[in-house]
Image (cartoon, rainbow, N blue to C red):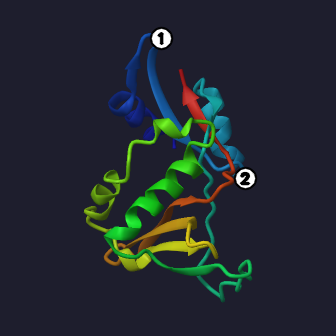
Amino acid sequence: MEDILGVAERHLSKQTDSGPRLNVWANEPHTGPLEILKTREYSPGFALEYKRRRHMEGQVEDVPRKDGHVVRALGDIEELPARSWASWAAFHPNNPDADYRGWEWYRYVQRCPLYRRDLDIVAISPNGCVASFCAAWFDAAARTGAFEPVGTDKIIGATAWVRL
């Protein structure tokens, strides 16, 4: 990890008025990396992100849905405004609605090489709104996947380590 951080600090740091800055994510349960980050003068910051990993052995537990909610793949283009608004509401809870800049940006997400609409999952509330969302990115060649972004009206924060 020391070598990786050295390379990242040399090639990926962003220059700011107060000097170079690099954000590094570290999972709290792994104290070894946290000690290395502290030694290298990183300090905890805050970001709206939550990461969890699990092995793929065994069954995924069935989670009961609220009455009337439907979980399914994202619909066609007519559903993009609702999906975009749900993302805005989830990740900008303290911003005024007037700051919302529309849904067209989501077309760029859909053009990403690993994007699959069948893995762009939404929970539709009884009133027809997108209540929650999750994009699953799957790389068959590398046999890896990620769930990002995942959002609803409540966001759980995680710690980002920042070197100022």
Which residue is the site of mark 1?
A: 18
Answer above or below: position of 155 versus 46.
Answer: below
Q: Residue 164, position in %: x, y? A: 53, 20
Secondary element type, mark 1 = loop
Which residue is the site of mark 2?
A: 29
What residue lies at 71% left-to-right and 80% top-to-bottom?
65
- Is residue 2 found left or right of 61 in the rendered image? left
In terms of depth relative to the viewer, which is nearer, 153 or 15? 153
In terms of depth relative to the viewer, which is nearer, 16 or 156? 156
**Badge 2: how crowded within 10 Å, few (<14), some, or many (20+)?**
few
In terms of depth relative to the viewer, which is nearer, 122 or 164? 122
**Badge 1: how crowded within 10 Å, few (<14), some, or many (20+)?**
few
Distance from label 1 to label 2 (Cα)? 31 Å
Total numbered badges shown on the rendered structure: 2
Give the mark, 1 or 2, whose residue is nearer the N terminus.
1
Q: Name the amino acid, label 2.
A: Pro
User: Which residue is most to the front?
Assistant: 127
- Is residue 91 found left or right of 136 in the rendered image? right
Judge depth for marks 1 and 2 and give the one in front: 1
Label 1–label 2 contact, CB within 8 A: no
In terms of depth relative to the viewer, which is nearer, 156 or 40? 156
Secondary element type, mark 2 = loop
What residue lies at 56% left-to-right and 67% top-to-bottom?
129
User: Which residue is most to the top?
Assistant: 17
What residue lies at 64% left-to-right and 50% top-to-bottom?
27
Q: Name the amino acid, label 1.
A: Ser
